[in-house]
Structures are given as C-alpha cells and as structure tokens.
Amino acid sequence: GNVVAVKTLLQTRKPGKRKIMLFEREKEIAAQLKHPNIVRSESAGVWNGIHFIEMEYISGGSLWQMMEQGKKKIPYSESIPIILGMLEGLAYAHDVEVFVTTEEGRVQQKGVVHRDIKPSNILLDHQPEGIVPKISDFGLAKAFGAAGCTPGLLSRTGTTCGSPLYMAPEHLTNFKYVKASADVFEMAATIFFMLTGLPIRPIRQEQDPFKSVLEDHPRRIRDYLENCSEGFSDIMDCALAYNENDRFANGGEFLKAFREII
C-alpha cells in the first residue's frame, strides 16, 4: 500500500560482475542509512534476474529542478533551512557506523563518503513545516574505513566517477581513497551553485572539464553573492579549499561552523 521509487540496474544488456558488485554495495550501505535528510531505502532484492532497491518516494523533485535546471538561483534567506538539512544529512553519513562486506567478510566501519554530491542528487520533500532536503544516490558511496577492501577492488586505480562541475581535485588524483573532505567540497560547490547560479570554476568551451578540476582554484563566494557576510564567506572558503587538508575534515565540522553564523 506504499508508494516507493524502484531503482534497478539498466536492463539493456546483461550487467557485468563489477556492475552487480557496485549495485550490491549500494544496497548494503543504503539499507543502513537512517536519517531524515537522507533518502531512505525500504527494501531490496532480485526479481527475475533484475537487481532492485525500493526507496522512499520523494515527490518534490530535486534542487536542480527547483533551480529550473540551473537558470534560477535561490535567495540566501530561503536557502538556510535547505543548507542546514543537507549538512545534517552529510554529518550523519560521515559519522554513522555501518557494516561493509569485504574480502575478509563483513566488518563494521565508521563513516560513508558519497562521492557525487550535486544539485540533482538533493531531493526535496515538501512538508507542512517547509522543504526537507534529502541526499540521494549513494551509488558511489564507500565506507571510508574499508578503503581498498571492497570485493573485486571495485574502485580500481585510474577509475573516477562524479561530476566535474562540483568535483574536488583529489577526486581525479586519488579517487580510490577520497575522504569525507571531498564531500565537504562538493556540498559547498552545490551550495555555491544554489546561491549564485554559477559553477565554482569558470566554464570555457575549449577546456577539458577534468583539466579545470585540477588547474582552476574555486571562486570565492563573496565576489558573486550580494550582501555576503564575512562569516559565511570564510566558511565557504574553508569548505572549498583546493588543498583537502585546509578544508573542514567532515560534514560535522562544516555543519557546526554554519550553525555558528546563522
């Protein structure tokens, strides 16, 4: 009697072993994430060879759709509860204890890295008390305590995933071992885009977008957001630091800093 969203592997061809492993990992991690700002996994299974996850259905669309595919920016005052909710979900994910299947068996680990935060992965649940943002699609997630232990070495050296408009530099240089600070960067890049309508790096037609990730330092929000407070500017500068060691280490630190200035 419940309406759910059903996510499956593409059925255009028989999925390979690695794709099934990735999907199984997503199912395993998603089932353990229980937070009001993360899309809930209801159940999962295999039916007639089709691997599927039943997930909480969110009818309000995504942040990308709210922005009219990037054409409309969201005023800062209107964005505060959305930013808070996104950071609450991220802080939880970076601190949660989960079980992960490794080559040695199931082990308990602390913290999950999303690795592909962007406006289309922020879903919006319209409640009487206001909009509740929910982080979706932990399909690239990896429990960072289990780095290198996933079955079949799923994140192979030289492999990268994610979206270059929001991507942290280490996503390209060290994808297999990206830390929670990469999510901090990509969440801040999403917030920057939501408030300014602009990506964190200039887009030049002649430039490879992945080269831009490595070479172009992020813009400073004070230069693009009218009436930007010094406190908010400093937080965004920290979250978008090019060097991962100069950023907030995780979503909890980012959330704490944001709460202190609102």
Image (spheres, rainbow, N blue to C red):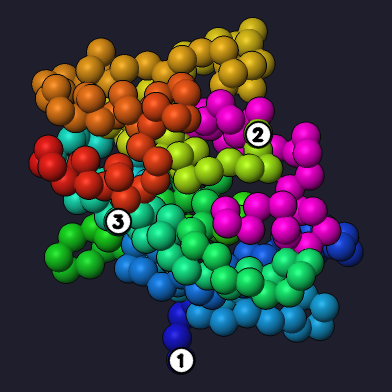
Residue that label 2 marks: 174
Distance between the alpha carbons at the discs numbered 2 and 3: 26 Å
Distance between the alpha carbons at the discs numbered 1 and 3: 30 Å
State the residue in front, 151 or 133. 151
Is residue 135 visible to the viewer in this orientation of the structure?
no
Residue drawn at (32%, 50%) of the image: 252
61 left or right of 234 in image: right
- Any magenta on residue 138? no
Q: Which mark is residue 152?
A: none
- Residue 213 sits above or below residue 64 on the image: above
Residue drawn at (54%, 75%) of the image: 31
Residue 173, image quadrant: top right
Distance between the alpha carbons at the discs numbered 1 and 2: 45 Å
Residue drawn at (53%, 43%) of the image: 179
Query: Residue 237's x, y, as percent?
Result: 31, 24
Task: Verify CB contact (< 8 Å) between mark 1 and mark 3.
Answer: no
Residue that label 3 marks: 88
State the residue in front, 200 or 175. 175
